[in-house]
Image (spheres, helix red, strand yellow):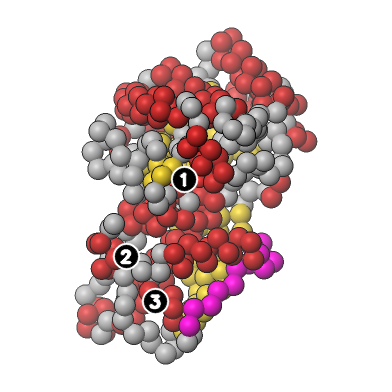
Amino acid sequence: MQNKWLSEAFKGTMPNDFQGKIGWQSPSNIALVKYWGKHGKQLPQNPSISFTLSECRSETFITYEKADSFSFKFFFEGKENPAFGAKIEKFLLENQEFFPFINQLHLKVESRNTFPHSSGIASSASSMSAFVMCLMDLERFLSLRSLSTVEASKGRPIELDLQKASYFARLASGSASRSVFPKMALWGATDCYKGSSDEYAAPLENDIYPVFKTYRDSILIVSGETKSVSSRAGHSLMEDNPYAPARYAKANENIKNLLIALKSGDLDTFINITESEALQLHALMMCSNPSFILMKPNTLNLINEIREFREETKIPLCFTLDAGPNVHLLYPESEAEKVEYYIKNVLADYCDRERWIADRVGNGPKKLL
Ligand code: PMV
């Protein structure tokens, strides 16, 4: 329990005229070493590492107004969306000890994603991290309002505490904990990284070779259908998966070796671990009970094409997969021209209506309002 953040929670009186609107955008992320299996209150069974993306992001606005009790409405892309609103409301109510001030507020949350609906891209990491950034900003604003003018003029930190944001985002959706940091993040305790924790992610930006800060992620849309297994159900299937102990041991070994490769710029090891992690994630789903096959024929066609192309050209590109059929093609920016030509001329034929999204490593959340 992070008592530090519990004791920091704003418990003062809310000014009667407290109202306004704030907005943040936050990106999605793509895991290289996968988080698959959790315990306790959203704690991971193994550490994970991801690239923070840039173009696939959520933009969230909160309009707030003092009220006698908590009330809440959620709109997604202009329409009220009670199903998604219920997830955010549950997160707020379950964790209200951290946000006691919400009991005096009416909140209207409006969110949109920059990536298309039917792209099969999970949005919980971007949407939950954007929401948490708004909530923390709202609390900061409230604390500032309650200070006297003299105290306020002494100034308060302008930057939000990203470790705290990561902690709250993790409570809302595990992978969201990694989205608050620029470039790359590590979530989960490991002896190989000082300061790592199961409770929040850590920024990796200063521990990676420059080439990784330039990485592109071209997301090849094999199918835009929503996933047939939610990540929530997927994590709980790991509880009875006979290969779970071996998986968690392997993930820890992959974290150790990937951290070394990221630091030294060893692209062969990076490729080897990244592809093996993607295939392990899908293998775990294939051997859970009930089992799921989330790859489509064109997922396999793309994997084979990508491996052949790498063999022939020696361009260090590789693939990873999320818990779905779409393929994330990862490569350094210096190879972008050749790889994009290859996507347009060969790989796009395997995509749903030739769709792919050009994304890249990004800088994390940004204040919009
Ligand atoms: O954060 P969740 O509960 O949506 O789980 C994410 C699981 C994967 O995307 C498959 C892997 C990961 O580490 O992001």
For marks 1 and 2, give the CA distance.
Answer: 26 Å
Q: Which mark is residue 175?
A: 1
Of the residues shown, which amino acid type is indicated by label 1? Ser
Q: Which mark is residue 101?
A: 3
Q: In the rendered structure, which segment of residues is drawn in magenta?
A: 69-81
Q: Earlier in the sequence, mark 1 or mark 3?
A: 3
* Residue at the image point whose x is 47% and y is 37% from the top: 239
Question: Is residue 144 found left or right of 120 in the rendered image?
Answer: left
Of the residues shown, which amino acid type is indicated by label 3? Phe
Where does residue 87 sit, x and y in percent of width and height?
A: 55, 60
Quarter containing the N terminus:
bottom left
**What residue would you read off at disc 2?**
158
Q: Is residue 79 magenta?
A: yes
| Residue 72: quarter of image | bottom right
Mark 1 vs ligand 1: CB under 8 Å?
A: yes
* Residue at the image point whose x is 50% and y is 31% from the top: 241
